[in-house]
Amino acid sequence: MKLESPVDSPEVSTGSVLEHLDGICASPFFISSKRCQQFLRYVVLETINGRAEQIKERNIAHEVFGKGSNFEPGEYSLVRVKAGEVRKRLSEYYASAPEHGLRIELPVGSYVPRIQNSRETPPAVEPVVAAASSAQKAFDRRRFGWLAGGTLGILGAASLVPLYRRKTEPLDLLWRPVFATKAPLLIFIPVMRERDGDLTEWVGIGPAAAMRRAADFLTEHHYPYHLRFGAELTFAQLREQPSLLLGGYDVDWTLRMTRDLRFVPLPSKEIGKQAFIETGERAFIETGERAFIDRQTNQIWKPVQHPPNPYVDVDYGILCRLFDSTTGQIVFLAVGTQTFGTEGAANLLFYPELFSSLMKQAPSNWETKNFQAVIRVSVIGTTPSTPQLVASYFW
């Protein structure tokens, strides 16, 4: 059936788009994933039918994944995780066959595909399809939880050549040792558990948001990565490549890697201990309550929650960069007392202005040192504020 569409032009026609779409879906990069095929077909067909404004997360969840009306984009993000996978598969597809006349892209922060003639080379190509709505452009401000499902070991961008900014910034220097390894960065998020200890398919809102920003950052720099979800990491996995570990306050690898550091998650043996917090008042850490402690001063940072708010009002996070002698690799670790602190801590790794705040407290030779940073975020609903640095340590 021929589709009448406003994208028809001498350069890009509906027929050529459909033929190109069939070729993509039949390629080795998409043939193994029916969901990725369905996702791509849905957003392309909606676009060439003139319904780009209808391509929204809730509609994709309903039409592609069969979710009902109770689907809440703010809480689950199977759509976002699949969109990221589609972007990577498209990147690999075009990297393997760059001479295609047409090119279908899924811009970061939007579900509306960009369809254009790839042989045209003006400095700025106007997209053939409708641009993303202002709500979609503001996507980065939304926070979400991701459905891990079976998404294990997704390969990031294919190129191994890091793309540095024209002006070298502290953030470039932070990532330079990682890029120099030319090994894909392992991004790991632990899955959540039920109250009885059984594993679920879900990950936290904060780690998921941080993972998405990490994926965007590495794609912008043409650097490869692997995504992994699960209960634990093995020593073999950690020694194969540099890694970014997101969340996991109470999992073994977090406790092992931080137990001898200055700022640490309060171990179970310390629960119930009285200590000073930042206000100078005495605080009692209840059994099961999460908190961070400065092992040099005994200062404690713990989240603040005012009922009936189901989420915390204030959260804390720790960011670590370790040249780990045990694995021989660079390890980044971002963990919050709650999910929002994880996101806040990880954001220092990807935003130059945030990392620069840490550099104001750094020694001149910080590039060769391990470091830790403690951050504080206020939380409105499920949206954390810009992280504020409250403590740091370099060694």
Image (cartoon, rainbow, N blue to C red):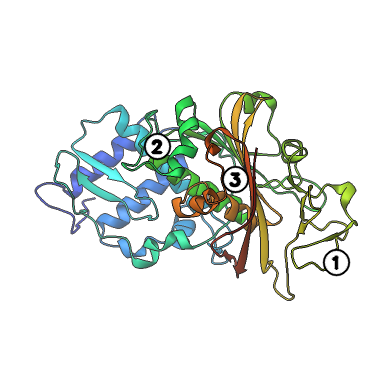
Question: How far apart are the two marked residues, 3 and 1, measured between alpha carbons?
Answer: 40 Å
Residue 76 in the image, given as x and y percentages of width and height: 57, 57
Secondary element at image label 1: strand
Is residue 250 shown left or right of residue 317?
right
Query: Which residue is the site of mark 1?
Result: 282
Secondary element at image label 3: loop
User: Taking 36 as reference, is 146 above or below it?
Assistant: below
Question: How far apart are the two marked residues, 2 and 1, measured between alpha carbons?
Answer: 54 Å
Instruction: Let me know if residue 182 appears in the view.
Output: no
Residue 10 in the image, given as x and y percentages of width and height: 9, 48
Residue 114: which disc? Answer: none
Query: Which residue occupies 60% across, 44% down?
Result: 149
In this rendering, the label closer to the viewer, 2 or 1: 1
Q: Which residue extends farthest left?
A: 10
Question: How far apart are the two marked residues, 3 and 2, measured between alpha carbons?
Answer: 18 Å
Residue 211 in the image, given as x and y percentages of width and height: 54, 46
Location of residue 272 (image quadrant): bottom right
Instruction: Let me know if residue 217 appears in the view.
Output: yes
User: Taking 89 as reference, is 48 above or below it?
Assistant: below
Q: Earlier in the sequence, mark 2 or mark 1?
A: 2
Residue 89: which disc? Answer: 2
Q: Earlier in the sequence, mark 3 or mark 1?
A: 3
Residue 228 in the image, given as x and y percentages of width and height: 59, 37
Q: Which residue extends farthest front?
A: 364
Residue 371 vs residue 91, the one in the foreground: 371
Q: Amino acid at mark 3?
A: Ala
Q: Amino acid at mark 1?
A: Arg
Whether label 2 touches label 1, CB < 8 Å: no
Query: Which residue is the site of mark 3?
Result: 148
User: Taking 206 as reference, is 218 above or below it?
Assistant: above
Secondary element at image label 2: helix
